[in-house]
Amino acid sequence: MNRKASLSIIFLTVFIDLMGFGILIPILPTFASKDLGVSDFGIGIVVAIYSLMQFLFNPVFGRISDRIGRRPVLVVSLVFTATSYVIFAFADSFWMLLASRMLAGIGGSNIGVAQAYIADITEAKNRSKGMGLIGAAFGLGFVFGPMIGGFLSEYGYSFAGLGAASFSAMAFLFALFLLPESNLNRKKDAKISLKLIEFESLRNAIRLPMIGLLILIFFIIVFSMANIYGTFALLGYKVYHLTDRQNGYMFGIMGLVGALMQGGAIRFLTEKFNDRTLVLGGTLLMMIGLTLMPYGGTFLGLALIAAVLSVGTGVLQPVILALVSKYAPQDQQGSILGLNQSVSAFARVLGPLWGGFAFQYMGYSFPFLTGGFFTFVTLIIVIFKLKPNLKKVYQE
């Protein structure tokens, strides 16, 4: 199968899976708050546990995929994801909800593997475009998923959970029957380390040129965004008095803008601007969006601010991921991208915990202002530390 066909299939697989994930995004906080009586901080814990599992299992899945291939890891992870949504559909307590999100986090540890799949089948000069497909899958998943979730929640939250499970089951079938293996140069006799936290791998990775700096930048950006993972829906529900469906529309708008950026505009931008300029511009827009979000005033105002934020993240994610991939040795693509995904997952653990705590005890604006402050810190780091001639040192 040619590269273009493989790219199309991995895109469809990730998109369908993330559409299932997107179904729960706008309704999870309100379901936990209204039906289960979970506090705002407790909602932060529920959101964070998903990312904690990703933090622990992303590098494991990445190392396994370097050894046995990307396809089997993707197939098995989708089984975990579909099962987690079934548990969510019948959750009637905080602990059952927590268990469903833990299993979903283990299944969701396949994103680093999907990124490694893209790296396997794209040349270095086209890597940003390839990584943009993963971003576009995220964006489209967040366009259709939240809208479907908001609609299904009107018939009961269990319907939304079962709907999410059905999409992940479809993605499982795609991966099982249509997805070819991409890692043709895997070392079949290499030992697989199953340590959940591989400190030696982290030390070795950050010693590589630019890898440590790029992982740090990605960590801060993800932490800044993660402050609003649980609180954005609560902002809509408690402050702007939006319904689940309206919250779904809001997430859908963000997803649509992100998909347009990462699936199309990023190709034009990477041809016109160098990567440092794109990182600077994306960080600036992200800072503006996060800082203004508590002050949107109306649904329209909030939607416009969310769109600005999505343009920023839509530029940043594929460009930084492409930079990490281009600096990573070819035989360590899975492990380093998995490590980067794991570090960013740790940021998604800390972000919701702080966001939920700040929302409940310090005021609804604090999670968003925290994100704005840290993106400003990132802007300073990029200005003084990121080399302006990055394209000259890529691996070809």
Image (cartoon, grey):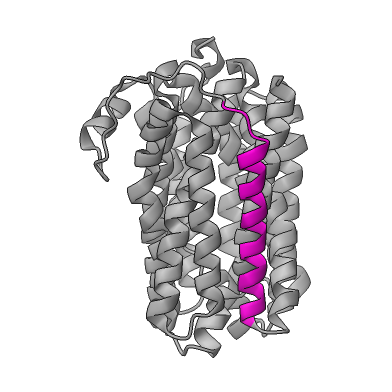
Which residue occupies 42% across, 46% down? 344
Most common secondary structure along the magenta stretch: helix
Question: Magenta stretch: residue 110 in it?
Answer: no
**Residue 362 position in % (x across, y down):** 40, 79
Q: Quadrant of the C terminus?
A: top right
Asked if residue 373 shows in the view, the reply is no
**Residue 64 position in % (x across, y down):** 38, 34
**Residue 86 position in % (x across, y down):** 55, 70
Asked if residue 296 shows in the view, the reply is yes
Q: Quadrant of the N terminus?
A: top right
| Total labels drawn | 0
Above or below: residue 168 compared with residue 343: below
Which residue occupies 60% across, 29% down? 277
Question: Magenta stretch: residue 172 in it?
Answer: yes
**Residue 356 position in % (x across, y down):** 42, 73
Which residue is farthest front?
177
Looking at the picture, tell me which residue is in the foreground, 335 or 300: 335
Asked if residue 41 lies left or right of residue 267, the reply is left
Q: Which residues are magenta?
A: 157-181
Which residue is farthest left?
200
Asked if residue 372 lies left or right of residue 300, the reply is left
Above or below: residue 323 compared with residue 315: above
Which residue occupies 55% across, 89% down? 34
